[in-house]
Image (cartoon, helix red, strand yellow):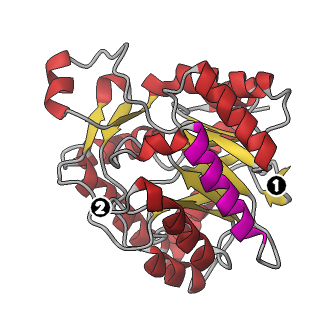
Amino acid sequence: MYPLLKKIFFLFQPEKAHYLALSLFGIARRIPILGTILRKSYKPIEKSVDLFGLTFKNPVGLAAGFDKNGEYIESMQDIGFGFIEVGTITPIAQAGNPQPRLFRLPKDEGLINRMGFNNKGVDFLTEKLKNLKQRKVIIGGNIGKNKVTPNDKAVEDYLICLRKLHPYVDYFVVNVSSPNTPNLRELQEKEPLTNLLKAVKEENMTFEIARPILLKIAPDLTEGQLDDIIDIVSTIGIDGIIATNTTISREGLTTPSKRIEDIGNGGLSGKPVRDRSTEVISYIHKQSNGTIPIIGVGGIKDSVSAQEKLDAGASLVQLYSAFIYEGPGIVKNIMAGIK
């Protein structure tokens, strides 16, 4: 059925289609008989993974950015995700970049986005999580800084989000790798990243139960920068790395160059980033002697691409773009084929 629905959704602008599809699925799952059928048809094989002191019912998660404000958690857990990452969230609500800001590349099975951390703010997300009627999966909170916050004041933005979300999420992700907030990626440099992660860890340890803290990195880092990150993560004792975010590279695309030029800036995700994200996972795994847990994300669309990430050293995987192209059966299909 999804191939037909996809044709309809692809008639709309991507961002409008995103919310239309989520709204329709949300309505369908609340219809008693239809909801039961949907849940049964999408239910994947359960293969639990123990990581970070948490038990994930399966290793396939929904990446941050898909449900920034925690409004669709119940729908997404019905599809079978083993964990859901909400955000990126910022202390204060912000509109993000002007529309259009999300673009499909069907020939490349990719997306370009320059959303700009559009979200309703940490207080909105906190209320959503507090009032969840059903919670069946691990939930991660992806945190960032507001666009108007200068980098030398960024630490406090991350700490505000951590404090407010701490009772309601199972792990945190420090996002310094989005290409769509001006100068954000400068926080990946050694000194500012060290200061940020130290502050986040220290704040986390003030709570009775410390949450796992992960760092999300870009695929565009050099080996030298990756070495710095491995050193920082190991020294400070951060719990893991998410590799990777979207890329600013446009290499190897089959979409006409004029179309790419017309789209302009933004982070590229989906199949085009598959190989690079796997390279980054493999590098981190080997250079750290397997001591740093990794969540692999980038170009995962089936069991083969998921297994590729696991074989490279990831313990869990996440997806986003492929959900748009493959539909809600993707988790079940991946779980049926991975080892």
In the drawing, what numbered circle is on residue 52?
Answer: 1
Q: Which residue is mark 2?
A: 20
Report the side of 303 relative to 218 (left or right). right
Which segment did they paint magenta? 190-205
Q: Residue at x 21, y 25 (%)?
A: 260
Q: Residue 267: where, in percent of width, then height?
A: 36, 37
Residue 197 counted in the magenta span: yes
| Secondary structure, magenta segment, majority class | helix
Dots 2 and 1: beta carbons under 8 Å? no
Q: CA distance from mark 2 to mark 1?
A: 35 Å
Q: Residue at x 33, y 21 (%)?
A: 250
Report the side of 214 relative to 88 (left or right). right
Q: Toward which corner of the image does residue 226 lie, by quadrant?
A: top right
Residue 22 counted in the magenta span: no
Q: SS class of the residue under badge 1?
A: loop
Report the side of 117 relative to 257 (left or right). right
Asked if residue 66 can be seen in this view, the reply is: no
The residue type indicated by label 2 comes to Leu
Within 10 Å of disc 2 (Cα), the crowding (few <14, some 14-19, many 20+) is: some
Q: Residue 37: where, in percent of width, then height?
A: 56, 64
Asked if residue 26 can be seen in this view, the reply is: yes
* Front-most of residues 24 and 209: 209
